[in-house]
Image (cartoon, coloured by chain):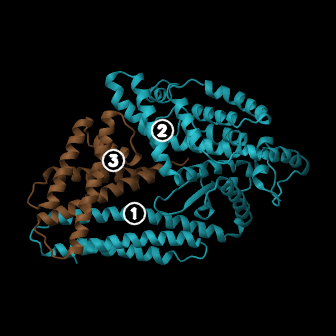
Chain colours: A cyan, B brown
Amino acid sequence: MSLIEKKISRLQSKISLLKSLLKDPNIPKSIQTGIQNVLDEVENEIQESKTIYTLTQTLPAKGWILRWIANGLSILDARLFRLNAAYTCLKSYSYQRGDPDLEISNSIIDQYMEELCKLSQLNRDEIIHMVSHSYSCLPLGEIPFYPVFLPAYDLAYPNYWGILAHELGHIYYDTRKEQIQRNLLPQINQIVREGVSKLVSDVEAYPISRDAAFTWIRWWTPEYFSDCFATRVLGPAYLALSNVELFIETTEDTEIFPPSHPPTRTRISLCLETLRKLQLDEMQPYIERLENEFKEIIKLPTTETEISRKLEIFTHPNILPLCFKLIEEAVDVFSISKLWPEVMATLEKLKVNGRIDRQSPLLPQVCAATLLEKSYPVA
Amino acid sequence: MTKYWQVLKDLEVADNIAKTANDALIVISMIKGGYQTEDETVNRQLKAKLVAAIEILNKAATAAAAKITDQEIPLEAYYISYLVSDRFMVPDAKELRETIQLAVNELKDFMENREKPIDHAIKLLQEITRITSKERQETLIELTRL
């Protein structure tokens, strides 16, 4: 058997194994079918490589063909790598679903996610939540499901589940990616490139505007978008809990370039701006309190490095407000303002009852609990 | 907190571009190596792979042209442009567009006549597979660091 044949055989066995492992009753059927379809597609492509390999056997000189066939198989192997990642996620999910210790918290988080998805019109069937080391979301590209992770220490603390809204914001972004790629990103690309070019010398204009546009498109726009999404859905509660979890841990003095997340002060500015635009008088005291809290952070001086100089340019006042405006317009999700009277009413109930009631919608209660800065048990 | 997100997305985009370029190289190598068949289904399949490569190159040409005229660039074209231009080290958009156009013309001629020269197209497609392969390796390394 030739090396190419061995590689084909190896890939085929990987697919067979992944297919057999998929049959798990805890894995939602729609996700199983989605992965099965991708596996079938990869299997067909492998079969096609095999056919081409056979067709070329009679040719006298086939060195280059073999090289390209081998290269093509490596690319298919990379797709299997992602499917394997999906599989390991799903097995952990299946295990956690069967764990009696997690049963209650899973069902409460299910209810909370259900409400969030319904309000933001996301397909709940494509989203699973799991316990992991931190809050994150792992979209698996062509594989049609989104695992969302939360840390074990927050299972019993709904006050922090607001960060899940930020993660759902990433999913919302992904489900609208065609529209975003067609409308939002080209405009941001143009604003950033033009804005940066005017701020630097002719020599630097090309490399810095290229880096700036790539950083904005690749990394920052989804983050700002998700912050805006979470702020609209949760109102001041998002910023209140983000104060503790999301922003404080992100320092301005990064050594990594380009940084995957935008500078803290700019994220806070966007959230505050989004809050103001919700135009609810009752929210004013909360917004003012948050503004005062964050004032000190925003004023913090940054260390002068080459990276910080670039970040200053990328977030220049000629660029930032224009991009923020576009992002805010693109986040056309439900707003908490519709639920605000309920949140206000819940504040009083929480103070009296001292617990979050599972029989009532969780979202307003979690928002209210966050604003009261107190942890309440769910009963 | 979701750095995985873009990293995996980029891997997917890079893989799709690499697969298209690589498939075209297989077909070119087969034809140049003397492969012939009367089977129309096979011929159609092979031709489709060259057409797909032309489409990818045209997108890169669009991106290069947009750079020259400062037009809006769709994300995929932007990414191809990033790969081909910035990583290929052809920062001059005009030169890049000409290089791509030459390759596209060669591919089109080659589809009509297998004796026509195709060296520029091969070189460009090889570069695309090399760059995307490098991108894939770097992305996988980045993933293990996250």
Residue that appears at 62% across and 38% down: A247
Pointer 2 local density, CA inside 10 Å: few below 14, some 14–19, many at least 20: some
Quarter of the figure with residue A175: bottom right
Q: Which amino acid type is marked by label 1?
A: Arg
Mark seen at residue A228: none
Name the secondary structure under disc 2: loop
> Quadrant of the rendered structure where residue A237 is?
top right
Asked whether, in this view, residue A245 is left or right of residue B95, the answer is: right
Label 3 environment density (alpha carbons within 10 Å; few <14, some 14–19, many ≥20): many
The residue carrying mark 1 is A79
Type of amino acid at the residue the image marks with label 2:
Pro
Q: Position of residue A40 (x, y in %)?
A: 41, 73
The foreground one among B90 and A310 is B90
Residue A190 position in % (x across, y down): 42, 34
Kind of residue sitting beneath label 3: Ile
Chain name for mark 2: A
Q: Chain of mark 3?
A: B
- Which quadrant, please, contains the C terminus of chain A? bottom right
